[in-house]
Image (cartoon, rainbow, N blue to C red):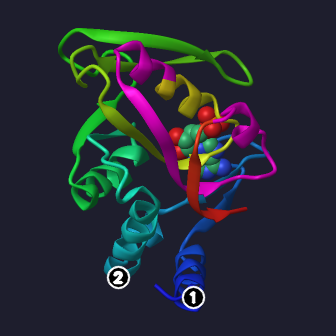
Amino acid sequence: MAEQQTDARRKAIAALIRDVPDFPTPGIVFKDITPLLADAARFADVIELMAAPWRGERIAQVVGVESRGFILGAPMALALGAGFVPVRKPGKLPSRTSRLEYALEYGTDSLEIHQDACEQGARVLVIDDVLATGGTAQATCALVEGIGADVVGCGFLMVLDFLPGRQRMGGRRIESVLSF
Ligand code: AMP
């Protein structure tokens, strides 16, 4: 795809991401992707642009993080000819799970994965909408590796570059459509 055309698509996508100040707490500017998801052509562009860097990487499974990671991760899996694996908030997955607790700015949060979700050594791509501080993505990678799969990289719709997410992810491959 021509570079100019890709830039135009990125701009059209960015124009449909709504900044909501002070949500969910004062001082946070929430990146609301619902206007983008509601637009058929732009939603399709997002999935194509997010999938492009990983074509040829023989991704066996896409791991999506609850809940916007499900919305982007499932069509990504189909685009890459891969399976889909959900990583969920505690108590939602019905079978045997692995759980990981990770630190937030204030307090902690936890995520779970089914222990048998991936084959040993499976090539896995982790998907979420936003990379902010990196805590969620880092915990997800640790969960996936904890059940024996191999994290090839992480894909996001957007990276918030004023936060230390990228640095926190160390040497992992990170791809995103947009940066703010
Ligand atoms: P973090 O663990 O700090 O990288 O935060 C990433 C998770 O929180 C992702 O699942 C995002 O959906 C969500 N998130 C963090 N910051 C924002 C934001 N400014 N707007 C929308 N979602 C966010």
Q: Position of residue 114 (x, y in %)?
A: 26, 18
169 in the magenta segment = yes
Spatial CA distance of label 1 from label 2 is 13 Å
Name the residue nearer the viewer: 148 or 76. 148
User: Residues in magenta?
Assistant: 142-171
Mark 1 and mark 2 lie on one chain; the one further toward the N terminus is 1
Q: Quadrant of the C terminus?
A: bottom right
x 81%, y 50%: residue: 162
Comparing labels 1 and 2, the label whose residue is closer to the camera = 1
**The disc labelled 1 sits on which kind of residue?**
Ala
Dot 2 amino acid type = Ala
How packed mark 2 is, by other alpha carbons closer than 10 Å (few <14, some 14-19, many 20 or more), is few
Relative image position of residue 133 (x, y in whole percent): 70, 36
The part of the image, by quadrant, that contains residue 81 is bottom left
Given the current orientation, which residue lies at the most extreme left position?
Answer: 95
> Relative to 127, is 40 on the left or the right?
left
Task: Report if residue 73 lies within the magenta region.
Answer: no
What residue does disc 2 label? 41
Label 1 environment density (alpha carbons within 10 Å; few <14, some 14–19, many ≥20): few
